[in-house]
Every structure is written in structure tokens, then in C-alpha cells.
Image (cartoon, rainbow, N blue to C red):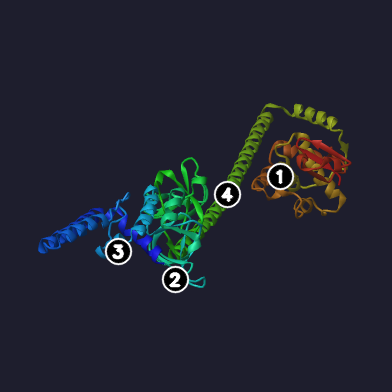
Amino acid sequence: MKVNRLKYNLKRYVFSGRYFVRNALFVMILLTVVSIGIVGASLLNSDDKKEVEETVETTKTAVPVLKVEAPSMIAGISHDELAEIIKNEQNVEVSAKESVVLAQTKVDMTGKFIAIEDAINIRNSADAEGEIIGRLYKGGFGEVIAENQGWTMIRSGKVTGYVASQYIATDLAAAEVAEDLKGAIATATEKNVCVREDSSEDADILYLAAEGETFIVNKDRNENGWYSVRLDDGTYGFMSADFVEVEDGYSEAVSAKRIDEVKAAKAQLAEKVAAEKEAEEQRKAEAEKEEARREEIERQEAAAKEEKAEEKKEEKVEEKQEEKQEEKKEEKKEEKQEEKKEEKTEETKSTTEEPVQAETSDLYLLAAIIYCEAGVEPYEGKLAVANVVLNRLRSGKYGATLSDVIYAPYQFTGCQMYSFPTALKTGGTPDCLRAAQEALNGNNNVPGYLYFRPYKNVALEKLHDYKIIGTHVYYKN
């Protein structure tokens, strides 16, 4: 124990550069005082001159010459300690040899330690059951306070506690490995610097670093423009090189409280990021839903416009046909109309039915329904509609009178049109009146047919007996 103590004192006080000047002066003064004492004694006692001279000679020979190859190692030593060291020449020589070794290392680790294992627990007492108050990562350093039975009391950063001695190197051993364990420290240069999950601006944010906050750099995983860093809780992330400064150095211990703070900050940020992602997904879903609704509205509006345009087109066609028919009425004479009637009768291969007795009001009623159901159809179509009405009347299934047949529920929608009342008074057009009169007289171009519809709305392959005239198909059942 005394030898070890002497080695420690030599390292700390004799071979330390901090106190070189003071200690050199002290040695010179000590030698001067010894020499003066010897000379003074010789002057006081002339009879013992020879003895004094021998004493001086002996003193000169006995005074040890301390050659310090590493002067920095003697700084801070006390007078008494230096005197004691000088008395023991062998110990001085041994210590001096060790000091040369220390002086040759690149890093002075006298009284210091360095962590040689990763994630070392720092406890509040020198036993494995002590409360964990901090953590050291590999390459972390600090000051040695005391050593006791396999445990070392250390101070690193803001943490003071005990670590198992096997996980750290101290003094000379620390100096020998310090250069190899030297790492890199990244310092955030701005507020709220993002530590991301991956080396990409699109990666999730794990942590927001405060300005001046430091991190251990994981050199093995650095990528172009990104540094892989270790957070205080031991997890890893990436920081953009644009927002950090990196220098070689050693890390310090992290307190347990700090580790908990980092974990809490990460958890809070993760929760916030998750909420933002959920909100973004919900916003996208609502946007897609709104886009679909808008497209549906646009489609409906377009369909409505198209339908309206088609109706206007049909109205114009109807108006033009009516105008043409009026013109023909004025231009053509009765004889030509009769000829045309005979020709059309021949073309449709009409049959002659028994005339139907009808009043004038029935004639106009039949002409009105012809106008509303087939006003834009050719003459044959108008005649066919009139005969469908009369075929129903003859069948007796739809009523006993012409009025019963036409006004039967859900049969002829033409009687519900806005133009029906006017047509009832006027007969619609001359062709409608003529078709009604011919049908009443027995000219039937669709004998036995009880139904008609726009042929585009009918599956013709399902019909066995039908006839297409204009845009309508006429059939029996």
C-alpha cells in the first residue's frame, strides 16, 4: 500500500508540470540551506575544521541529484513529501521510470478514468444493489475520486457515483487506451434540430434537440450529409450535417433523470406525430370524399343540362314540324291530302274496321291524345296511336267509352301534359284531327295492337309480334 501511495503521489505531485517551477526552487533552496548550515558549523568550531570538511564533503556526496525527465510530474508536492522522497533514492528512481512512461502517452489521464465498456450503470453506493443514478457510454470519461474493493467512485458531468472497476480504465491504463476510445461529439447549432428515424427529410422525427445540446456520433453509420447520433437514452437517430458541429472528444455521464426526460420527450413527440398522421389521413379521406361528391354533382349537372338541351331540341323539332304542317295545310289542297291518305294507307297495309260512332268531343279528345303522344311522329305514327286507343276500346278491358280508355289510370301520360288542354280544344294539328277521323272511320294500320313505347326502351327480342313506326314500337302484349 505504501509503494502504491508513493507511486500515486509521484505521478500527481512530483512529475506534474503544473508545479515544476515551485518545486525546482524548493530543491535549490533546500540544497542551499544544507550547504550554509555545514559552512556555518565549520566557522564556529575551528578545532573541528577537519571533521566539518569531511562532513561537508559527505553532505555533498550524500545529497541526491533528482533528474526529472518529466518535470510536469513534480508539481504540487509539499516540502515534507519531497524531503521524504529524497531520503528514499530507490523509490525515486522507480517512480521516475514510471513517470517517463506517462510522459510518452498522448493523453494525460492522471486521476481520471475512461469507460471501456458500453452502457455502464452508475450507482449511488458501492454495490450491485445500489440505485442507478446515471449511465456511462463507451469512451465516456471523468475524474476518479476513490477506489474501494472493486468499485470506483467517479465524477463525470453532473453525475457522481460508483461504477464497477472492471468496466473502466484509470490513470496509466486509461492513458494507454484514451486515444483509441476517442470519439466525436455533435453539437446542435440551432433550436429544435430534428433527430430523425432515418437519413431522410421524409423520415419520422424521434426527438427535437435544443441549441447547444450534444450527442455521441456513431461514426460507423454516418451517411452523406447525415450524422448517426446516440441520444441520452441510448437510442440512435440521424441529424442533418447542416444543423450540427462535430468535434473529436469524449462523452460524459448521463443522469437517470436526464434519461427519463429524453424518453418522455420522445414519447410525447411520437404521440404528437401519430396524431398528426391520423389527422392528415382523415383530411385526405375527407378530401377524397369531397372530390367524389363534387364529381357526382358535376356529373348530375351535366346530365341535367344534356337532358334539358335534348328537351329543347325536341321542342324545336316539334315546333318546326308543326310549322311545316301548318304550311302544308295552307299550300296543299284537299285532293292532294286525299291522295296522300290513300298512299299511306297502302304502305301500312291497314285493315278496315267497323266505324266507331263518336261525337265531336270524342274526335277532339282522340286528336288531343294523338298530339300529346305522337305530335312529332310521322302521320302513320299518329294513325297508329289513334288505333291503339280504339283497339283498347274494342277489347272492353280499359273502359266502355273513349274517355274511359284515354283517362284510364297509368295508361296515357299525354293526357297529363301541359299542352293537352289546348289540344283538346283545337285538335292539336290538322294531321292529328285527320288521323283521329280516319281511325274512327275504320282505317287501322295496327290491328289488334294494344301498346306502344319508344323502341329504344324495349327489348325487341322479347316481343313476338310488333311493328316499328317512327320512334315507337307497337305490339300486342
Give the quarter of the figure containing the N terminus. bottom left
**Can you tell which of label 2 and label 4 is closer to the viewer?**
2
Query: How much space separates mark 1 and mark 2, taking CA atoms?
Result: 109 Å
Judge left or right: residue 325 versus residue 217.
right
Q: Residues within 10 Å of mark 2 (few under 14, many from 20)?
A: some
Asked if disc 1 and disc 4 are in contact, CB closer than 8 Å, the reply is no
Quadrant of res 140: bottom left
**Can you tell which of label 1 and label 2 is closer to the viewer?**
2
Residue 191 visible to an observer of this rendering: no
- Which amino acid, by three-letter code, is at mark 4? Glu
**Can you tell which of label 3 and label 2 is closer to the viewer?**
3
> Which of the two discs, 1 and 2, labels the residue nearer the N terminus?
2
> Which of the two discs, 3 and 4, labels the residue nearer the N terminus?
3
> Which of the two discs, 3 and 2, labels the residue nearer the N terminus?
3
- Which amino acid, by three-letter code, is at mark 1? Ala
Q: Residue at x 64, y 48 (%)?
A: 418
According to the image, label 4 marks what residue? Answer: 288
Query: How much space separates mark 1 and mark 4, taking CA atoms?
Result: 52 Å
- Which amino acid, by three-letter code, is at mark 3? Glu
The mark found on residue 171 in the picture is none
Asked if disc 3 and disc 4 are in contact, CB closer than 8 Å, the reply is no
Tell me where residue 42 appears, x and y as whole percent: 13, 61
Query: How much space separates mark 2 and mark 4, taking CA atoms?
Result: 59 Å
Query: How much space separates mark 1 and mark 3, taking CA atoms?
Result: 142 Å
According to the image, label 1 marks what residue? Answer: 368
Asked if disc 2 and disc 4 are in contact, CB closer than 8 Å, the reply is no
Q: Residue at x 15, y 63 (%)?
A: 48
According to the image, label 3 marks what residue? Answer: 84
According to the image, label 2 marks what residue? Answer: 124
Q: Residues within 10 Å of mark 4 (few under 14, many from 20)?
A: few
Asked if disc 1 and disc 3 are in contact, CB closer than 8 Å, the reply is no
